[in-house]
Image (spheres, rainbow, N blue to C red):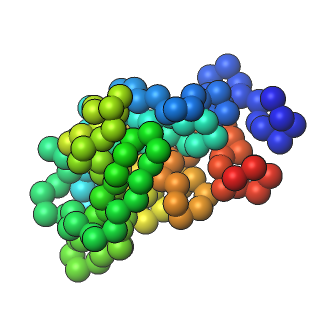
């Protein structure tokens, strides 16, 4: 363990103990996304992706996202593990953060369970909750991790990390 890494308490996880390639697992708590004061997604069937040095990223089933809030963006990106991601604008009451969510329509082999799910950047929403805790955004615009008190870093893109 490098000296800059925070030692987790027994009730915490270290992002540096997460695997690479990433692990997908069921989220242990309800996950909610609030934008413009409205809950636009709420699920007890979310998935979380755990990857070395990253805060967990939560993927919510599309059927648990309010209809009409997601508009496809032309932007695409590629993850060496999960495959090609498509981005979405989120629109509520005329407010629209650009490319505030993304999904893998046809995930790479081994990540098939992510099909039909969407992830949100917590820093672009009013609140993202894991259980009753409001998550903060993982540092950096590229990473979509949700930082909660049960996960310690530092996280990729934070001062003192290698990336």
> Where 9 sits versus 116, above or below?
above
> Horizontal and vertical percent for residue 133?
48, 42
Measuring 48% from the left and 53% from the top, which residue is drawn there?
A: 144
> Horizontal and vertical percent for residue 66?
17, 55
Question: Could you say which is closer to the camera, residue 36 or residue 103?
Answer: 103
Quadrant in the rendering for residue 127: bottom left
Measuring 43% from the left and 65% from the top, which residue is drawn there?
A: 124
Q: Residue furthest bottom?
A: 94
> Horizontal and vertical percent for residue 17?
65, 27
Quadrant in the rendering for residue 11: top right
> Horizontal and vertical percent for residue 116?
20, 42
> Where 157 sits versus 7, above or below?
below
Measuring 87% from the left and 37% from the top, which residue is drawn there?
A: 3
Question: Could you say which is closer to the camera, residue 149 or residue 89?
Answer: 89
> Where 128 sits versus 47, above or below?
below
User: Would you say 143 lies left or right of 24 here?
Assistant: right
Locate the N terminus and report the quarter of the image it occupies.
Answer: top right
Question: Could you say which is closer to the camera, residue 48 or residue 128?
Answer: 48
Residue 130 visible? The answer is no
């Amino acid at each position: 363990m490098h000296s800059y890494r925070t030692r987790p308490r027994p009730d915490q996880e270290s992002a540096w103990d997460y695997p690479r390639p990433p692990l997908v697992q069921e989220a242990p708590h309800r996950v909610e996304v609030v934008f413009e004061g409205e809950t636009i997604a709420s699920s007890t069937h979310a998935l979380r992706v755990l990857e070395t040095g990253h805060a967990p990223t939560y993927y919510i089933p599309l059927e648990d996202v309010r209809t009409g809030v997601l508009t496809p963006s032309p932007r695409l990106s590629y993850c060496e593990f999960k495959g090609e991601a498509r981005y979405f604008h989120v629109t509520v009451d005329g407010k629209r953060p650009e490319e505030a969510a993304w999904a893998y329509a046809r995930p790479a082999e081994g990540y098939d369970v992510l099909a039909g799910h969407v992830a949100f950047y917590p820093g672009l929403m009013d609140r993202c909750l894991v259980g009753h805790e409001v998550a903060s955004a993982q540092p950096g615009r590229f990473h979509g991790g949700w930082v909660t008190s049960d996960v310690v870093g530092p996280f990729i893109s934070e001062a003192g990390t290698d990336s």
